[in-house]
Image: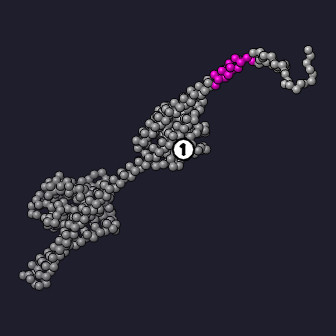
Amino acid sequence: MSADPNPSSGPHQTSLPTKASSGPKQVPGAQPQRPQGSEMLAELMQTQRQLTQAMQETRELRTKLGRRSHQMQVLQQVSEILAATSKGGQVVSVVLDVLTQEFHCQRAVVWTLEDGGAGYIPKDGTGLTRPEWSPMRLPAPNPFPGTPLVLFQSQWLDPSCDDAILRVLRGVDGSQLFFIPFEHQLLLLGFAILALPADRRWEEEDLDSITILQRQAAISLYNAWLFRDLSQQRDALQRQAIELERVNDALREADQLKSEFLALTSHELRTPLTGILGFTRLVMDGLYDDAEEMRSMLQDSYTSGQHLLGLLNDILDLAKIESGKLEVHPEPFSLAVLLDEVKPIAEAYPRRMDVELFWPDMSGIPEVVVDPSRLKQVLLNLLSNALKFTKEGSVAVQVERHPGLVALLVVDTGIGVSQEAQVRLFQKFAQAEGGHSREYGGTGLGLVISKHLMEMMGGTISLSSDGLGTGSTLRITMPIA
């Protein structure tokens, strides 16, 4: 029975679709799809590749981390060592060890700023013998003045720096030279130059480690430089303090001697002056029996005046010496003639009865270059001292001839001079035996003046004695004319 073509008023009845099959729905004209297992296999392989790559990156990162950790440990140890040392040599040695061990350089040399900042001196090297690296001195402040170089930046050195100095460091294997500066406060305190293989490339962590090492080394070198400078200043201050103390001791001693000199001089001047005034008053008052006694009084007054004049002349000569106004006029002169003039004056000097005065044979003695009046003054002073300090025995004048000079010796058997007194005998105001109550008179200026006079005439004066009670020998030398 055929269906009614016109719709009815009741529900429209449609036919149910047939049940779909379990396989993919075939679309007319579409490509057949890959099986689901192939997609899973492709995804699995891609995931495996990504995992392998991730593992490789992890291993590389772990290696880098391990190396960085090792470098940080090394740098920490180096930092502790450098912080504990104040010597530039130890700093250089530690830095060189780190560069050698951590960066495997074939040869390396470290320079530091020395010679007061005038140049860079090689302090230590590796891969070379000391005779090879020790002559590698470089100028300051720029060790490579002929090469454009950023001094405060680590970099490969241009081959133009490979002059006669660095050629040994580069070697015959064509190594590259890497420059590592140690800069602090814009001052290049030193640097290291490493000889590395031509194919060597720096890793980022290596450069970071070198940067840290640079800062540590630069600060340590700067501290060592400051410490050395402070040590030198301390030593200089200590030497100055010792010298100042020595000068103070000398000034105290000179002040004491000067006080003794003033007390002694006032006594020495008063004694002859009192004699002059006393004898003159006696003559003026007519207190003498006859002309002979008056003449004796006048003679004593004259002798006291001569003694007073000698004391004043010594003081004036010392003043001229200290002001640089004392003059001498050396000329060729005969010692025999000079001794003939000195002999009667010395014979008239007061001396004890048991003291004999001996004179030398002057035959064959050549002329000498002296100022006759000044040499006469010196010789009379020596004879006066010898006669004054000799209680018994003799005073002898001796002559010796040596190549180019003649020596006169005044040898006495007097009180002698102690070793302590010999040290200061030629100082101002000093005598062989001091103190205000000395048995012997004198101002203590005679030997000082004699020393200056002999030196001004090109001669010398010296004293020798084995000690107290053994006598003494005064020796003067003069150049032969």
Say which of 349 and 227 sits in front. 227
Which segment did they paint magenta?
34-50
Say which of 426 and 196 sits in front. 196
Which residue shows up at 11% across the image and 76% down it? 296
Say which of 173 and 198 sits in front. 198
45 drawn magenta: yes
Image quarter hosting the N terminus: top right
Is residue 253 shown left or right of residue 9? left
Say which of 103 and 304 sits in front. 103
Q: Can residue 156 be seen in this view?
A: yes
Q: Can residue 475 be seen in this view?
A: no
Residue at numbered disc 1 = 143
287 drawn magenta: no
Residue 347, image x, y percentages:
16, 65
The secondary structure that most of the magenta stretch takes on is helix
Give the farthest residue toward the left: 289
Give the farthest residue toward the front: 9
Q: Is residue 280 above or below residue 373?
A: below
The answer to which quarter of the image holds residue 272 is: bottom left
Q: Residues within 10 Å of mark 1 (few under 14, many from 20)?
A: some
Which residue shows up at 46% across the image and 46% down it? 222
Residue 18, image x, y percentages:
80, 16
Residue 268, image x, y percentages:
18, 70
Amino acid of disc 1: Pro
Q: Is residue 167 above or below residue 478?
A: above
Residue 90, image x, y percentages:
42, 39
Marker count (numbered): 1
Q: In this view, does 378 lie above or below 465?
A: below
Which residue shows up at 17% across the image and 60% down it? 433
